[in-house]
Image (cartoon, coloured by chain):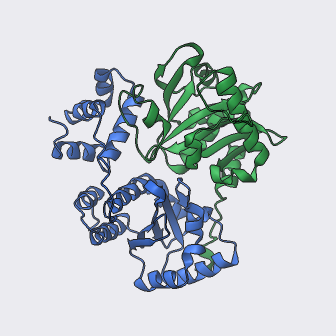
Chain colours: A blue, B green
Amino acid sequence: MKPRVEQILEDLEQATGLEHLQIAVEALRDHYRVDHVVYHWVSSSGEQYGCGTYSPEWAQRYQEQEYLRTDPVILGCFQRFHPVDWKMLDWTSRAARTFQTDALKYGVGNQGFSVPIRGPNGQFALFTVNHNCDDATWERFTEMHRRSIILVAHFCNQKALEFEPGRKPEPAQPLSPREVDAITLIAMGHSRAQVADALSISEHTLRVYIESARFKLGAANTTHAVARAISRGLIVV
Amino acid sequence: MLRYIYSDQMALYPKLRDTMFRDRADQFKTRLGWDVTVNEKGEESDQYDQLNPLYVIWQRPDGSHGGSMRFLPTVGRCMVNEHFLDITQGVRIESPLIWECTRFCLSRGSDPAVAAALMLAGGEILDRFGLRHFVGVFDARMVRIYRRIGASPTVLGTSGEGRDAISVGLWEFNPEAKARVARQAGLSPELSAMWFDQAFGDPKPDSFALTA
C-alpha cells in the first residue's frame, strides 16, 4: 500500500538515527511510486554521507570513481537553492557522459528532480527523486509533486542535522503568537476568509502565515499542521 | 535582457556587476538616504550579498545594469526575518516555498517597463521553481510603480516615514497577473521563458534518456 506522506513525516519526526532516515527515504520512494529517493549530504569539509535506495554497488562505485567531482547534479546544485530537473543540467562534457552511462548501468533512472539545500556552516545537501520513464510522464509527475518534494527534502535535512556529531541543537523556532492564532482559528473550523477577517489581515497574508507555520511544524499540509500543533500542545481547541 | 545570476557567477559579468552595485548606491544612499554601506568604489552592498543570493537583473544593450532585485530563501539567513519582524507581526516567514526579494533597484532614468520586466522575472521564478510567494522589502515610492505595472504586493506594513519609509509586502502571481506585467514590460512570454532557460538550462528532451 502507498504510505501517506503525513505518516512518513510522523515517523521521521521520531527518528533518532540515520537508520530511521533510511526508512523514511524508502517510504517516500513508495509514496511517490518512483524508482529511487536519495538524500545526500556534503559537509563543509567535504565529508559525505547519505541514505537512499540506489544499489549499494552504485554507492560504492560512486565513491571509488570519485564521481562527486564530475556528477553534473552535484556540480549544478552546489551553492544553489533552486530545485533542478536533471534535464536542465549540463550533460555534454565527456566526464558527465561517462558518469551518465555508468549510472544507468547501475540502475539509476533516466529522470531526476533534485532539491539543493544550503544548511548552516557550509553544509550542503541534495534530495533527489529518480525514476525511469519518458519525458511527458516525468513532467506530469514533477508538476504534481514538486512542492511536496521540496518540503520533504528540507524536513529530511533538518532531521539529518540533528544527528551531526557535536552539533548544538538549534533552538526550536516556536510559532509566533500570530501563527498560533491563525492555526487555532483554522482548527476551530473557520474558513480562511473568516480567519483573515478575525485577525484583521488579508487572506494573502494569512496564506503566508499558514505556509510558514506548516513548514515550522514539519507538516505535509494545513490539516496535518493543525494536527501537529494540537498534539504538541501549541494550540488548544 | 533579463539575467538570472547567482552571486558566485557575477565575476563573469564585471560591467553588469559594477554598474548594479553603483546603481544601488545611487538609489539607496544618494536618492533615498538610507543607512547603507557604500565602498570607496561607490558601490553599495551588505551582508546578504555575501550569502550567494540570486540576482535578477535587467541588462541594457550596452551590458550595463538597468534594474535588479535580490533573492534569498527564507529558510536561511535573510533580511525580512532579521530586520523586519515588527512589520510581519513577529512572524518569522520561513518556508522553502517562499523566497525573499530585497534591494529592488531601478537605475536612474529607467522607465517603468524595467520594473515590469523584473516583476515578470519574479513570476517566472515562482512558476518554474514551484514557489508560492515572495516576501519583499522595498522603498515606499515603489508601491506606486508596482500598482502602475499591475503587480501590487499585499503590503504587510511600513516602517519610517517619507523617503525613509521601508515596506514589507507579499507577492503571488496568477497567470493573468503574469500576462499583465509581460504586456507592461513589452515582452513576449516566449522571450521571457527563453531568457529563463538560458540562465537555468534549457530542458533538453531525452538528453539523459537517449542512452537508456
Residue A160 sits above or below residue B38 on the image = below
Can residue B60 be seen in the rendering of this structure?
Answer: yes
Closest to the observer, A29 or A232: A232
- Between B109 and A34, the residue placed more toward the observer is B109
From the viewer's perspective, tell me whether residue B211 is left or right of residue A198. Answer: right
Residue B119, above or below B2: above
Could you tell me which residue is drawn at 63 percent across and 41 percent down? B121
Identify which residue, B200 or B45, lies in the foreground.
B45
In the rendered view, does A25 fall on the left or right side of A82?
Answer: left
Above or below A24: residue B142: above
Q: Which quadrant is home to the C terminus of chain A?
A: top left
Q: Residue at x 36, y 27 (%)?
A: B89
The answer to whether B211 is drawn above or below residue A75 in the figure is below
To which quarter of the image does residue A9 belong?
bottom left
Q: Residue at x 40, y 71 (%)?
A: A50
Q: As drawn, which residue projects farthest toward the front?
A: B40
User: Which residue lies most toward the right here?
Assistant: B62
Q: Where's the N terminus of chain A, which quadrant?
A: bottom left
Residue B185 shows up from this direction = no
Asked if residue A52 lies left or right of residue B142, the reply is left
Residue A209: x and y, percent?
36, 35
- The image shows residue A159 at horizontal and vertical percentages of 32, 59
- Which residue lies at the image location 27% right of the left edge and 31% below the top edge? A177
Residue B79 x, y percent position in the rendering: 49, 36
The percent position of residue A226, horizontal first and vertical second, equals 23, 42
Q: In the rendered image, which quarter is residue B56 located in? A: top right
